Image: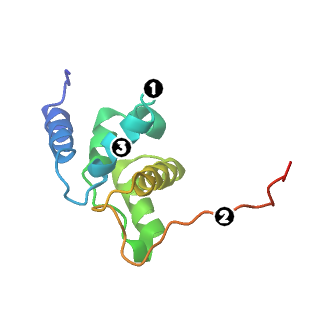
């Protein structure tokens, strides 16, 4: 990959390295997104440049107690649309929860499902 701005290249490299760690960063969610949506790059989903995606990736993940405020702060800090960041994070965190990663489990939170109607006995 080639970038005119050396700062952008360094930021993108830092984000790529962060994906390899379990540091509590948004970067932790990117491999899960790519595995679930192989035809949709996270940058495309966020309508972000490589620099903007790197800024999102290097942010700490939203805290449970103030999730929406944190997600909006991530969007504002990176220049990405707030609604797109919220949608991206919710989807990626749901994928992570559904995968059953023990490391990703949030204490005190149980993922449950229910039926909205009776099954047809026939």
Mark 1 or mark 3: name the one nearer the start of the chain: 3
Q: Position of residue 40 (x, y in %)?
A: 45, 30
Q: Earlier in the sequence, mark 1 or mark 2?
A: 1
Q: Is residue 6 left or right of residue 110?
A: left
Mark 1 to mark 2 CA distance (whole Å): 30 Å
Residue 91 in the image: x percent, y percent? 49, 50
At a point 35% along the width and 66% down the height, the residue shown is 105
Q: Position of residue 95 (x, y in %)?
A: 44, 50
Instruction: Determine crowd level at label 2: few under 14, some 14-19, many 20+ residues with C-alpha closer than 10 A.
Output: few
Question: Is residue 88 positioned above or below 117 on the image?
Answer: above
- Marks 1 and 3, Cα distance to the nearest angstrom? 13 Å
Question: Which label belongs to residue 39?
Answer: 1
Sequence order check, earlier mark of 2 and 3: 3
Res. 48 visible in picture: no
Q: Say which residue label 3 marks.
A: 32
Pick out the residue farthest to the front.
122
| Label 2 to label 3: alpha-carbon separation | 25 Å
What residue does disc 2 label? 114
Classify residue 113 by image quadrant: bottom right
Which residue sits at x=47%, y=55%? 94
Can you give x and y, in whole percent of width and height, for residue 32 in the image? 36, 43
Q: Residue at x 43, y 38 (%)?
A: 36
Which of discs 2 and 3 lies nearer the camera? The answer is 2
């Amino acid at each position: 990959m080639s970038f005119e701005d050396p700062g952008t290249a360094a930021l993108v490299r830092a984000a790529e390295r962060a994906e390899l760690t379990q540091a509590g960063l948004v970067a932790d969610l990117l491999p899960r997104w790519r595995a679930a949506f192989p035809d949709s790059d996270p940058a495309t989903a966020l309508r972000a440049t490589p620099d903007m995606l790197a800024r999102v990736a290097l942010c700490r993940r939203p805290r449970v107690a103030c999730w929406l405020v944190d997600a909006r702060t991530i969007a504002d800090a990176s220049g990405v649309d707030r609604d797109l960041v919220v949608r991206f994070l919710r989807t990626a965190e749901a994928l992570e929860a559904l995968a059953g990663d023990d490391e990703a489990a949030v204490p005190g939170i149980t993922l449950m499902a229910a039926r909205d109607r009776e099954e047809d006995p026939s």
